[in-house]
Image (cartoon, rainbow, N blue to C red):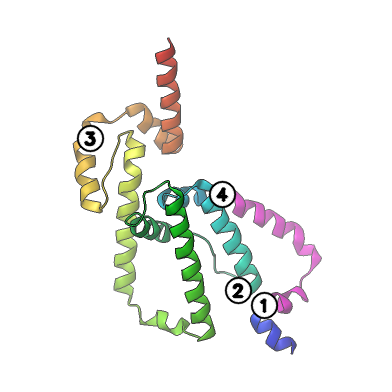
Amino acid sequence: MITSLANVFPPVRWLAKYDPAWLPSDLIAGITLAAYAIPVSLAYANLADLPPEGGVYGYLLGGIGYALFGSSRQLAIGPTSAISLMIAGTVSTMADTGTQHYAQIASLAAFTVALLCLIAWLLRLSMLVRLISDSILVGFKAGAGLTIMLTQLPSLLGVAGGGHNFFERLVLLAGQLDEIRYLVLALGLGTDDEAGNDLVRLFDRNAAWR
């Protein structure tokens, strides 16, 4: 009975062996992970064109869910850049970004994927992952990296950017290189591009007041 329950709810197995002396180290590890995960989750929400809190919820609920039902001690669960880009690329064709309809479709997509993962777990379909070749994974990662780069470069350079696909974004960015705001670029290289843009907007507002 206990073995069957442990297969469905792994904490039954490891909680019995947990040493309270590990708790301080686990708390430090949790705080360290939160310091990394919170800004990253905000960035992933931005990639998906969702409100910032959406990324935090994804990290929080995903981590808690896997801690309760997962079995790997090394696997990290949470939003990824690739998933965020796929949400933005698919949902944007069905609804305008920034609207409630967009957020509803994105939420429905998340629940649908969760349901498919549950079905795959019940049917023990994890072995299908082995059928995906390394070349496909490398191509997918390279494409995701290039797309992320082109979506973030306009903010780093302080230009408008735009476009709905890789080549359109590249052409628009190339045409805006003469509009680079070097203060934004300098601040972006030293901190992050959004903070740089916020500071420059503040400077512009102060100049207008004068």
Which one is nearer the viewer's eye here, 98 or 40?
98
Question: Callout 3, which amino acid?
Answer: Gln
Q: Which residue is mark 3?
A: 176
Left or right: 30 in relation to 101: right
Mark 4, secondary structure of its residue: helix
**x then y, percent, for residue 189:** 40, 36
* Quadrant (top left/top right/bottom left/bottom right) for the C terminus: top left
Q: Residues within 10 Å of mark 3 (few under 14, many from 20)?
A: some
Q: Residues within 10 Å of mark 1 (few under 14, many from 20)?
A: some
Give yes or no for residue 33 being in the magenta stretch: yes
Question: Callout 4, which amino acid?
Answer: Ile
Assess whether mark 2 and mark 1 are in contact (beta carbons under 8 angstroms): yes
Which one is nearer the viewer's eye here, 8 or 102?
102
Left or right: 37 in relation to 136: right
Where is 137 relative to 153, above or below?
Answer: below
Question: Callout 1, which amino acid?
Answer: Pro
Q: Quadrant of residue 185?
A: top left
Question: Callout 2, which amino acid?
Answer: Gly
> Residue at coordinates 31% horizontally, 53% vertically from top-left?
147
Q: Which residues are magenta?
A: 9-35
> Residue at coordinates 42% horizontally, 46% vertically from top-left?
98
Mark 2, secondary structure of its residue: loop
Q: Which residue is mark 4?
A: 38
Mark 3, secondary structure of its residue: loop
Q: Residues within 10 Å of mark 2 (few under 14, many from 20)?
A: some
Left or right: 109 in relation to 64: left
Q: Which residue is mark 2?
A: 70
Find the distance from the CA under tag 4 to the CA under tag 3. 32 Å
